[in-house]
Image: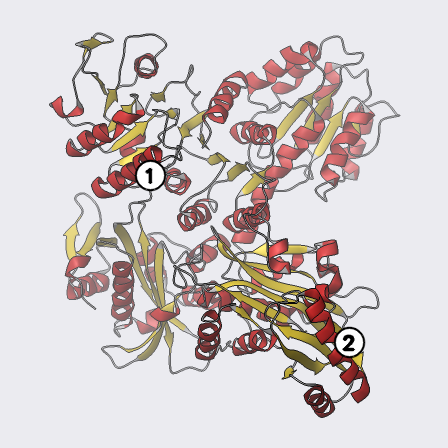
């Protein structure tokens, strides 16, 4: 249901507290107390049939007895009363309920029934529900403390979402001690309705939120979560602490891919794809919060370190080194200025060791020089109490210099109680302070990682030089036959046929079921050859000594046949062995890689890339990614492995054909996108010889899927089914298809061809150039929340974009905003009409009920098109704009 009605919950005009009480120590008392003490400005209605008044306010027996509407109900009763209460809320038109009652996580029949009822009620009545088993919600802007916490949050621009009430209260208490402000504190509890994805969606559109922190134990509605996180992380940092990193998978893996794709590694891949920064500890999460709340986000790792002792400065430098970063090299000018104020024995480099007897005045001078140095983009000040009598004096001497700098400035005042006064001075001045240099650097680099994530999200993927073709029908036949078998594992021949259908190169392989047949095939292929056991019951042939290489003549082949059969039955006496496979021996491959996919129960198919052959499980050098992939994502998948350093060429090792490897990964991604029945897939090894790749061995495990492709993916793939060829009202033939990330160059070319007037009509402002971030934003879209179509000329050999139209879904997913842009040369030729028709059809398919857009009064051509297509056109009072809107129930293709 996404962000529907969440605004009514976080900014309610009226609240009913169900279970309100005057009894101290009760949850109903705590909630009433927090609302009143927090000076919540709206109406608060106590609901308790056993009281006439609560907190000197009239108490009602039920929500239905109120003679006024209520936006938010806070339920603080016994859990068994919740179903009846929710029915009353639904009937009375309450928009949202926060159930602080404990329950909703029980596994017994009663608990399952309660969970089922709450979910159904939320869906049926559209009553939004947070909880049960949550601590409540806090919104600083609306002075709302709808929780039973002992304190309320200090005002700020961060939001915190937690699945754990204990973590929620701990972060709240620490934020008050450290003077860190928050705009929202949200405890989700059992997440039977409102979940992480919904709240991220809502917070992404709130200008009072600059960043989001989360504590996650588990997720649900994974596709919704990924969609929301990918959209919001482009504009706001999302930092997550995901607990349960050490948990193993739920079942034994049947392949190398299954072994190497652990649950936590998949979360890492998902968070990375969504642009989320993941931290590992509660301490790290809170350190990030402190830096985010008080300082600008780091845009580069160019950090200067000032310390009054060599050891702590080196600790900070070592911590940077752990991230592959070195302290910024100081310019000759900066070194000269520092030498003028520091004793001759100072370090003359970064970290800047200013000596143990440095005075507050000397600290101030050094800080001032560093702040004025053009090469510095971050400053860490360290103090280890030695001969300085009062560390607070140093803090006072520098705080005035540190305000309103465009980069982060933070401190590490080491030691215990004797530096607490100094730390308090920094807190009051909005300067983050950390116990150790390592913690300070870690927080700095965690947030720098977000800047790197943002750069990656906005990078434009290159196109492959040719269009890829796939034989989906052939692949469908292979999978349908395989899944009907008692053991739905594709044997090597079938697995390679499946890969070949999607253009993945394989080593030619034939099957022999006799000694004579093996000898004949080997002679026809030419020696040397390789032979393997051919059995669906023996997945890992190497474990069964089922692979023999370098067979150079007929005698070798005959002996190998007998040995392989003996090894197979020795390994598994009950195995059905269909014979042996024979294939040309790939001589001396330069590299052996593994490519694979595993269908995760939560995230769907996961792509694996890494070092292959006999080193696969020994080195476990691998990286993971979620499909769909493009060239850029495929390259990053490879770059995240150690073997990539070899693939680009290393000493005597020639480089691999990286573009070809990218293409193979994209083809593999498309295969598991198209077929949800693929449970596990291994290509091991993918042999690289003379720069080219070939699958020497492959196996595929199938399993029936209740979810049809491509809905089994957590990231919506390119919708091929929406491609269409059209002829405009003026007879122009165009190819209309959804926009792709690779379309950035031709989209930019379209923009550059526009007149100033056309740009103003579309963007409501004058723009000379399309910024990179906007180019990425317009071409890298989430097909679950946006529909964008481009019109390409059918008359030209090279792709030329004539126009583009898009529908952007609002958070409630019931309404969407549209826009249309057509090149000046092509305006008035029916292209905009065809594009907009495609967008409206796509929006209707996504469940959108109403589409609207703003059009300038001067844009008469767009107003004319809108009226022609059936839009209602209404002038906005006191504005130079019209609103065009359409109820999609009245729209037909």
Q: Quarter holding the N terminus?
A: top left
Determine if residue 460 is in view. Answer: yes
Say if mark 1 contacts mark 2, CB within 8 Å.
no
Tell me which residue sits at (73%, 73%) in the image.
566
Dot label at residue 794: none
Comparing 453 with 500, the one in front is: 500
Q: CA distance from mark 1 to mark 2?
A: 57 Å
Residue 836, percent from left and from top? 27, 65
According to the image, label 1 marks what residue? 193
Residue 386, percent from left and from top? 80, 14
Residue 707, percent from left and from top? 39, 59
In the rendered view, would you say 619 is above or below 288? below
Q: Is residue 55 left or right of residue 284?
A: left
Farthest-out residue, front: 573
Comparing 68 with 65, the one in front is: 65
**Res 419 → quadrant:** top right
Which of discs 1 and 2 lies nearer the camera? The answer is 2
According to the image, label 2 marks what residue? 549
Determine if residue 770 is in view. Answer: no
Dot 1: what SS?
loop
First reached walking from the N terminus: tag 1 or tag 2: 1
Farthest-out residue, right: 345
Comparing 798 with 271, the one in front is: 271
Tell me which residue sits at (72%, 16%) in the image.
415
Tell me which residue sits at (58%, 73%) in the image.
491
Q: Give the image's coloring scheme.
A: secondary structure
In the rendered view, would you say 164 is above or below 803? above
Dot 2: what SS?
strand
């Amino acid at each position: 249901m996404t962000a529907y009605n969440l605004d009514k919950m976080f900014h309610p005009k009226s609240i009913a507290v169900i279970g309100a009480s005057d009894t101290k120590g009760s949850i109903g008392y705590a909630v009433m107390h927090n609302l009143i003490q927090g000076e919540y400005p709206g109406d608060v209605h106590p609901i308790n049939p056993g009281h006439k008044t609560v907190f000197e306010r009239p108490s009602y027996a039920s929500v239905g007895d109120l003679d006024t509407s209520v936006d938010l109900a806070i339920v603080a009763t016994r859990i068994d009363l919740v179903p009846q209460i929710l029915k009353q809320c639904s009937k009375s038109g309450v928009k949202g309920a926060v159930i602080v009652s404990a329950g909703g996580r029980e596994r017994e029949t009663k608990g399952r029934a309660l969970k089922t009822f709450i979910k159904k009620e939320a869906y049926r009545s559209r009553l939004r529900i947070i909880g049960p088993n949550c601590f409540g919600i806090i919104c600083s802007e609306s002075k709302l403390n709808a929780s039973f916490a002992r304190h309320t949050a200090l005002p700020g621009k961060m939001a915190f979402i937690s699945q754990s009430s204990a973590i929620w209260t701990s972060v709240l208490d620490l934020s008050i001690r450290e003077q860190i402000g928050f705009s929202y504190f949200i405890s989700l509890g059992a997440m039977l309705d409102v979940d992480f994805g919904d709240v991220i969606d809502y917070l992404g559109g709130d200008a009072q939120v600059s960043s989001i922190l989360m504590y996650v134990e588990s997720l649900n509605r994974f596709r919704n979560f990924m969609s929301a996180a990918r959209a919001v992380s482009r504009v706001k940092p999302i930092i997550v602490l995901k607990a349960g990193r050490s948990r193993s998978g739920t079942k034994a893996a049947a392949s190398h891919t299954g072994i190497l794709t652990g649950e936590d590694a998949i979360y890492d891949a998902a968070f990375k794809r969504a642009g989320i920064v993941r931290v590992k500890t509660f301490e790290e999460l809170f350190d990030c919060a402190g830096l985010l709340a008080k300082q600008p986000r780091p845009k580069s790792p160019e950090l200067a370190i000032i310390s009054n002792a060599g050891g702590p400065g080196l600790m900070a430098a070592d911590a940077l080194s752990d991230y592959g970063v070195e302290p910024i090299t100081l310019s000759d000018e900066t070194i000269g200025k520092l030498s003028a104020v520091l004793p001759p024995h100072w370090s003359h480099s970064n970290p800047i060791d200013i000596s143990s007897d440095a005075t507050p005045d000397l600290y101030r001078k050094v800080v001032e020089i560093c702040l004025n140095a053009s090469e510095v983009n971050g400053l860490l000040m360290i103090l280890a109490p030695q001969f300085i009598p009062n560390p607070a004096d140093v803090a006072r001497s520098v705080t005035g210099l540190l305000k309103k700098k465009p980069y982060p400035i933070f401190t590490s005042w080491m030691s215990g109680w004797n530096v607490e006064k100094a730390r308090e001075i920094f807190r009051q001045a909005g300067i983050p302070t950390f116990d150790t240099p390592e913690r300070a650097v870690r927080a700095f680099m965690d947030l720098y990682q977000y800047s790197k994530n943002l750069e990656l999200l906005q990078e434009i993927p290159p196109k492959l030089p040719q269009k890829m073709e796939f034989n989906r029908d052939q692949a469908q036949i292979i999978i349908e036959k395989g899944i009907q078998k008692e053991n739905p594992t594709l044997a090597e021949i079938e697995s390679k046929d499946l890969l070949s259908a999607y253009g993945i190169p394989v080593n030619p392989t034939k099957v022999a079921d006799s000694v004579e047949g093996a000898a004949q095939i080997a002679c026809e292929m030419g020696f040397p050859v390789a032979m393997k056991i051919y059995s669906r019951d023996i997945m890992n042939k190497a474990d069964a000594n089922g692979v023999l290489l370098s067979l150079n003549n007929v005698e070798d082949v005959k002996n190998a046949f007998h040995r392989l059969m003996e090894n197979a039955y020795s390994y598994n006496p009950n195995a059905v062995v269909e014979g042996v496979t024979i294939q040309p021996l790939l001589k001396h491959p330069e590299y052996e890689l593994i490519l694979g996919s595993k269908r995760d129960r939560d995230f769907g198919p996961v792509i694996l890339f890494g070092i292959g052959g006999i080193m696969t499980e020994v080195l476990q050098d691998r990286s993971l990614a979620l499909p769909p992939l493009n060239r850029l994502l495929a390259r990053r998948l490879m770059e995240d492995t150690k073997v990539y350093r070899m693939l680009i060429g290393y000493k005597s090792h020639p480089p691999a054909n990286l573009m070809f490897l990218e293409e193979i990964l994209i083809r593999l991604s498309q295969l598991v996108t198209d077929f949800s029945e693929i449970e596990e897939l291994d290509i091991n090894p993918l042999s690289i010889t003379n720069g080219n790749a070939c699958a020497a061995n492959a196996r595929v495990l199938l399993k029936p899927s209740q979810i049809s492709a491509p809905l089994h993916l957590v990231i919506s793939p390119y919708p091929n089914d929406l491609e269409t060829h059209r002829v405009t009202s003026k007879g122009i033939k165009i190819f209309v298809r959804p926009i792709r990330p690779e379309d950035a160059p031709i989209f930019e070319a379209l923009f550059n061809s526009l007149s100033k007037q056309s740009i103003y009509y579309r963007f409501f402002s004058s723009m000379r150039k399309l910024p990179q971030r906007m180019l990425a934003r317009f071409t890298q879209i989430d097909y679950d929340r946006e529909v964008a179509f481009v019109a390409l000329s059918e008359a030209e050999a090279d792709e030329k974009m004539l126009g583009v139209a898009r529908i952007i879904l609002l958070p409630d997913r019931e309404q969407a905003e549209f826009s249309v842009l057509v090149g000046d040369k092509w305006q008035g030729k029916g292209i905009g009409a065809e594009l907009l028709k495609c967008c409206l059809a796509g929006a209707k398919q996504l469940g959108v009920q109403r589409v609207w857009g703003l059009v300038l009064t001067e844009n008469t051509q767009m107003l004319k098109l809108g009226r022609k297509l059936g839009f209602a056109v209404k002038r906005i009072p006191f504005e130079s704009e019209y609103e065009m809107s359409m109820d999609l129930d009245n729209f037909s293709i």
